[in-house]
Amino acid sequence: MAARPSVDETDQPIGPFVMLVFSFGAVFYVLGPLLDDPSRTVLAELPVSALMFVCPVIAAAVLVRGREGVRAWLRGVWPRPRLSDAPWYAVSVVLMPLVVAAAAVAAGAGPPGAVVTWDAVFGLAVLYLISAVAEELGWSAYATGPLLRRLGTLRAGAVIGVIWALWHVLPYVQQGHGLDWIVGQCVFTVGFRIVLVHLYAAGTGVTGPTLAHAAYNVSWSLSPVYDPAIAAVCVFIAAVAVGAARSITAPTDSSYGR
């Protein structure tokens, strides 16, 4: 089954998009020390600069220009679900929790030390779904399509992944992580983006990457142990598996390349 384009296939300028994302993010880098720590309201330890999740969608909206431009950009972003795509939506929901769980087990995690309530899980899911929508409307709905056509899945995922990782470096520093942790998490981020690009190209539009993005954040927040180096190995294994599954289920798909 061929992948369905999920957005208008006109080329959007990627360079200006990246510049705007980093420029808007700089506002949150500066405001970080001046505002309260958002960790008080979520289970995960997050710096204020983590609130920069709004930057990709704002950058994309600026570049598409005007009401009609926004409508054209958003047209088809969330394609109507088809029964044949159900496996890919299921993968979008369950893959990253499995990756995080596997990484935790490999890192030697024991039984959870505290009982997590369903209310807490639901609250995290809502919070992270909102942030994932804002990010993926930029990274997936705006930037992914043009890069897929030019570079194919692997290279497009790597390019966006490197940019995405660099964008997060200062928040990691503000959070107090050391160099080893930051490097490991950046490598993980590249592999994770390759997974998200595969999901996008499989025909889920922005829905697949959004669900996977939110599912990862919830799982990471609840994980008793998180070693980014181990998680990076696990997510690259997942990326290979997803790519192989796409090749098997859509062997004639050449609309985006691999």
Image (cartoon, rainbow, N blue to C red):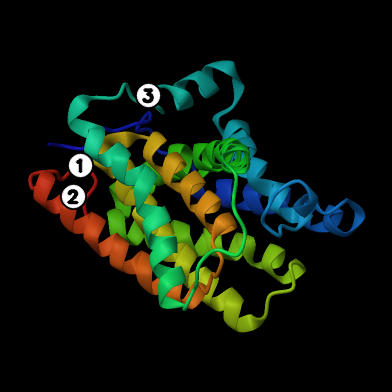
Q: Where does label 2 land, which residue?
A: 246
Disc 3 marks which amino acid? Gly
- Vertical relation: 62 (above or below) 220: above
The image shows residue 222 at horizontal and vertical percentages of 57, 56
Identify the residue position indicated by label 1 in the image.
Answer: 255
Q: Quadrant of residue 127?
A: top right
- Mark 3 or 1, closer to the camera: 3
Provide residue 241's location: percent of width, then percent of height. 23, 60
Q: Nearer the viewer, residue 186 or 151?
A: 186
Neighbour class for label 2 at 10 Å: few (<14), some, many (≥20)? Answer: many
Q: Position of residue 108 (x, y in %)?
A: 47, 78
Distance (Cα) linking label 2 and label 3: 21 Å
Q: Which image quarter holds the N terminus? A: top left
Would residue 159 be visible to someone looking at this image?
A: no
Which residue of the protein is positioned furthest toward the right in this rendering?
Answer: 34
Q: Position of residue 178 (x, y in %)?
A: 67, 80
Q: Is residue 88 above or below residue 80?
A: below
Quadrant of the rendered structure where residue 190 is? bottom left
Q: Nearer the viewer, mark 2 or mark 1?
A: 2
The residue at the point 37 percent across, 28 percent down is 8
- Quick one: SS at disc 2? helix
Q: Residue at x 42, y 21 (%)?
A: 75
Report which residue position mark 3 lands on. 76
